[in-house]
Amino acid sequence: MFEDDASSKAQRTNLSLKEEQHAAQYAAMIGRTVALLVIAPMVTFLAPWPAPIFIYFFLVAFIFLGWFGWKLSRSAWAKPWHPYAFVTADFALLTVALLYPNPLVPVELPPQFAYRFGGFIYFFVLLSGLAYLYRPMLVLWGGVSAAISWFIALLFFINLPDTVLISLNGLGGSSSFDEYRSLTHIDLGVRLQEIVVMLIIASLLALAVQRSRAVAVRQASLASERANLARYFPNKTAELLAGKVNPFSEPSEHNAAILFADLVSFTSWSQAHTPTQTIELLREVHGVLTEVVFRHNGTLDKFIGDGLMATFGTPEPTRQDASNALAAAIDIADAFEHWQRTSQLDAGKSLSLAIGVHYGSIVIGDIGSNDRLEFAVLGDAVNVASRLEAATRKAQCRCLISDSLVKAAMAEEQAGLDAYVNRLEDIPAIELKGRSGKTAVMALR
């Protein structure tokens, strides 16, 4: 039942994480666009006209890079190296925007003067946006790209003929004060500290993202396991099992109710219909039956061709398992007849549904090899329920319910149960194939 191998689980987890990354990237693009649109009017009022026009160009370029990168990541042309290329382009463009002299500024200033504005702090804003993508290597690459871009620009400005380079020792005498007063001076110590600090912060942020990614992967794995369990168990049971490690490693024996349902004469029916019609009908019928099983807190053990096996009281017993199974059996019969009356699939209206239910001792646990395990419900109660379902043809009824189940249900004293029991008919005890003696049963005509 739980044939969920490691590769398929990893694929679902990676897919979930990838979707989270795309969603985070989209949110980052929205935030980035809003931030740039807020900066635009601010620049309009703070910078002397027509200098803002030059800045508008970079704002539009940043918006374009962000949205184009997001669109490309969702397309068939996406490559693993694309995000790294866009991050490099972002930091290179930011370096140019911060240091390239604005030709539209009415005041003429030397290129080296751009370092006086402290624009390096904007690199950290751009770097922090990468943390949302759950990709630590991309964050680290962002820090390296920023450091390389800033260092290349620094080398360019250092080699300008009028650059006054302040030594790493800082102010060492009166001549150093003269150097600091120069409009073309560059403090090499400060610039190198910026690069080192950027690399340190990028490394620390990458470690934090790695931790966040591990948590996200764990949550994605739990969500995948919970979704897989929800196909078989009621929601509350699925939540319980999702939080356990190897919940069925130790066999458990207790009483439970077992229900088998099967389409009568389906083999001959399928021979007269196309595979597409067969699949379409099975999907509808299985959907109707499963909804009733879950509504009565049952567990879908497995689909058996055109039928199913459901259990009530697994993986853990409750005080109303027999009552739930009895109500589910009758509701399944009614739901199937309602489906036949209302379904648009006329081909399925010639079929009938046989149901057998029994209550008794079962054992549950994992069976199989170390490489592949499957959850299994075993025991004589399972065999009896299966034989009861098969015996409905001879008894000419829709459902056979063992006397053991009815007595167990009555002992539970659940409200509304009498309405179900009153619909059952006492019939003579029957012999079941492969079993000695007779089994007391009640029938639903």
Image (cartoon, rainbow, N blue to C red):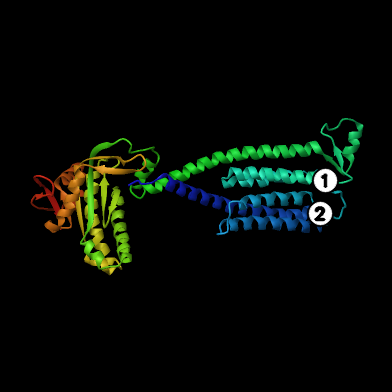
Question: Residue 138 appears at what percent x and percent y?
Answer: 61, 45
Instruction: Say which mark, if any, is on residue 102.
Output: 2
* Foreground of the two, 102 or 394: 394
For the question of whether residue 121 can be seen, the reply is: no
Q: Residue furthest top?
A: 172
Left or right placement of residue 445 versus residue 256 in this view: left
* Foreground of the two, 339 or 84: 84
Q: Determine the residue positioned at 25% across, 37% down.
A: 253
Comparing marks 2 and 1, which lies closer to the viewer? 1
Which structural element holds mark 2?
loop
Question: Residue 261 appears at what percent x and percent y?
Answer: 23, 54
Q: CA distance from mark 2 to mark 1?
A: 16 Å
Q: Determine the residue positioned at 67% across, 47% down.
A: 126
Q: Amino acid at mark 2?
A: Asn
* Rendered image quadrant of residue 286: bottom left
Going from the N terminus, do you reach mark 2 or mark 1 first?
2
Left or right placement of residue 289 versus residue 138 in this view: left
Left or right placement of residue 437 versus residue 286 in this view: left
* Rendered image quadrant of residue 116: top right
Q: Determine the residue positioned at 54% across, 42% down.
A: 213
For the question of whether residue 372 can be seen, the reply is: yes
* Rendered image quadrant of residue 202: top right
Instruction: Name above or below for residue 202 compared with residue 431.
Output: above
Residue bearing mark 1: 157
Question: Residue 248 appears at what percent x and percent y?
Answer: 33, 38
Which corner quadrant holds the C terminus? bottom left
